[in-house]
Structure formats: C-alpha cells, structure tokens
Amino acid sequence: MPKLLTPTSREAQTPLCQFSQPTQNVLEEQQVPMEELKARCDRYYDHLSALQPPQENIMLRAANFTVASIQQMIQASPDSAFIRVYYGIKENGEHELFMVPVNPDGTPDSNADTVYVDNCCACPPMGNCSNDELLSDS
C-alpha cells in the first residue's frame, strides 16, 4: 500500500502553508489504499462529466513531469521550501500544468536563474497515461 505525506491536521495549521517557516508545516506519513486515491480522481472526473458541455476528455486530469526537470528546478532555487503547481492554457488552447519554486515570503521565485517546469505530457489525451489505474473511467 502506498504512503501519502499529508498535513497532520488542516485545522491546526493557520495559515495552511507557513512559507517563512517551512518546518512548521507538519506532514505525517499515512498508508493510503489505492482505492482512496482513485476515489479522489473519480470525484474530479464526475465533476468534469457533469459540466455542460462535459469536459472529462478536455480538461487535464493528470500531468507528467520528468524527475530530472524537477531536480534541476530544486537545484536552481535551493532556498525555496515549496513548489507551486499552476494550471494554465497555452495560446493554442492546450491545457497544461507547470511548477514554480516558491520563496519564503510565499511569492514565486522569479530570479534570472530560476527554473520553472512545464509538464511533458498530460492526460487527456489518455494515451499518455493509458495504464494508470487512478485515471481509469469511473
């Protein structure tokens, strides 16, 4: 069974993210059944399906990032304790996610040497994630 690092208590953390004191963000490791993670993904799929017109085959449901690109981003911003994931749409209408290192004051790092990371391929199209049990249709 996979392990999930999750906040120990969302109610106890005010605000939820302590950017200037990242050690205050306490996460605990919990065993998580794949069924629970799939249920999260299924609820999102159901939400997209219920939209008019349905969006389950248009809106991003997952994205892939290379480990090497994430490591490069972290090495270029060693003082960042957080990575923020943004959802965007390219000029051509293609949906995407990208990652940005976050400064201790909670702002995106925008120094000249900062590295941001685009996803390398998204789901949909499902061909990019065809064997993903978390994304199999509800």
Image (tube, grey):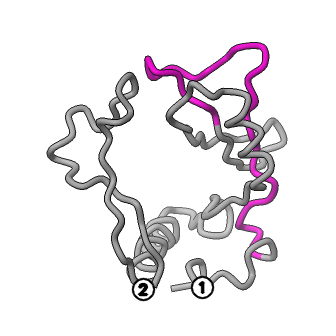
Mark 2–mark 1 CB contact (< 8 Å): no
Q: Secondary structure at mark 2?
A: helix
Q: Quadrant of the N terminus?
A: bottom left
Name the quadrant containing residue 80: top right
Residue reaching furthest to the left: 12
Q: Position of residue 33 (x, y in %)?
A: 40, 84
Would you say the magenta stretch is mainly helix, strand or loop? loop
* x 50%, y 33%: residue: 81
First along the sequence among labels 2 and 1: 2
Is 26 a magenta residue? no
Q: Nearer the viewer, residue 125 or 110?
A: 110
Q: Position of residue 128 (x, y in %)?
A: 79, 71
Decide: few, some or many residues near mark 2? Use Cα within 10 Å; few <14, some 14-19, many ≥20.
Answer: few
Residue indicated by mark 2: 35
Placement of 138 over or under 111, stated as above or below: below
Q: Secondary structure at mark 1?
A: loop
Residue indicated by mark 1: 133
